[in-house]
Image: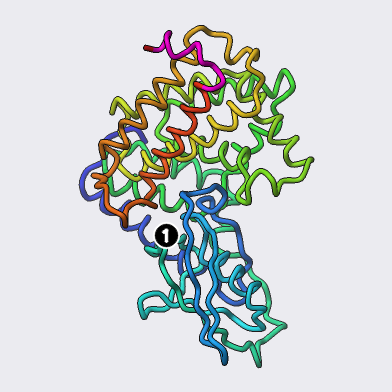
Amino acid sequence: SNEPLDIAAERRILRCLQCLRLCLELSTGQPGMATSTPHITTFRGSPLDIEVQVPMKQPHRFRLSLHSNCSISELRRMIGDHIKADGRVRIVHAGKEIVNDSHTMEQVGVKHGFVLSATVTPLAGANTDLKRVESPAVILSEDDSTYDILISLLSSTSSEIKTESYLILELLPTDQRIVETFNVSGSANGDQKLTEYLATAMRRPDVLYTVQILDSLLTPLDGIAAVSNEKHARSMKVLESFCDCDGLGLLLEVCQMCINGSLPFEGKSIRMFFGSGLRVLAFVLKYMPLDSECFKADHTFKTVMRVLSGLSLYVALGNLHGLSVKPENLASEEVYLYQLSSALLVDLLILHPELVDSYI
């Protein structure tokens, strides 16, 4: 309902959302529970390197390159593959075991340069005949109304309700209706559907969710070099349709609004939006021909430059999260965004040196 809620109703909704989030977190990785891929792990976060030490007969220590949205379950798999584990990998940080597989590196507080300990617990006596059951995340994702309700709650006047709603969206599999909207584009009907969707979605509270999905479709978790030709071709098709439907213009508009502070995003949401938005923008500049229609407008490159230079200054001044220039902060997400935006700005000026005078 669009009617304003009274305090008691808001508290009931908040409590229901908190219980649902807890249920989703506790059910992840349970024996016999069918797994799903949480939305938060489908797109990259800021890069980070960690060290893992394994107290074996001969102590072993190695480095892993990850990103802040890497899930704990994926970290277990990477460690297990590296040490050829024949049991469950247990991960310990600061004397405390990390048990929740659905959490990401950022959520458990693991940052660049941290050292984790790992041990292996044998699976002797495990019940291999355990019946597989669907997880709560899978069950909820099969009902479209789940996403509709959560997205509608992002418009709530309660910051706590908005936060809980988005945390649940992060834990659930990505809404496949939006994925399909991008994937079926390329035909007249498909492009019309995508155009209509973008025209509304890029101006709604769930714009962050939409840009993250686009990020996951365009920029692979393992890097461009690791992508098959078939997957790259699909990414290019999505990119072309996105640009044909004025997606670039809408993305730049939202970026500018974020920099100007005219969108009701909080610190973390702004950082996440710019992380995905800049990766999408980098993909556009890298793969779309410079004579494409999306670049034909006289103001397009100037707008890109304003967004990139504005964001570089915005981050450098610490407006995203009170950034202070200390060595321990050099791998923070704010610095990652600063480096990404600055690198894109330099690349653009190299491609179009004539823009220097016109921009100034």
Instruction: Judge whether residue 325 is colored magenta.
Output: no
Give residue 309's position: percent from left, percent from top: 38, 26
Q: Which residue is mark 1?
A: 112
| Nearer to the camera, 65 or 164 | 65
| Nearer to the camera, 300 or 144 | 300
From what the image shows, is residue 18 above or below residue 92? above
Q: Quadrant of residue 335?
A: top left
Magenta region? 350-359
**Viewed as shown, does residue 320 lie left or right of 61?**
left
**Viewed as shown, does residue 346 lie left or right of 257?**
right
Q: How many numbered marks, from 0 up?
A: 1
From what the image shows, is residue 256 above or below residue 154? above
- SS of the residue under disc 1: loop
Q: In the rendered image, which quarter contains the N terminus?
A: top left
Give residue 276's position: percent from left, percent from top: 49, 39
Instruction: Judge whether residue 354 is colored magenta.
Output: yes
Q: What residue occupies the far right of the structure in this picture? A: 230
Q: Residue at x 29, y 40 (%)?
A: 320
Give residue 243's position: percent from left, percent from top: 61, 21
Q: Is residue 20 visible?
A: no
From what the image shows, is residue 303 above or below residue 286? above
Q: Residue at x 35, y 51 (%)?
A: 330
Three-letter code for the amino acid on which mark 1 is drawn: His
Q: In the rendered image, which quarter contains the C terminus?
A: top left
From what the image shows, is residue 349 above or below residue 84? above
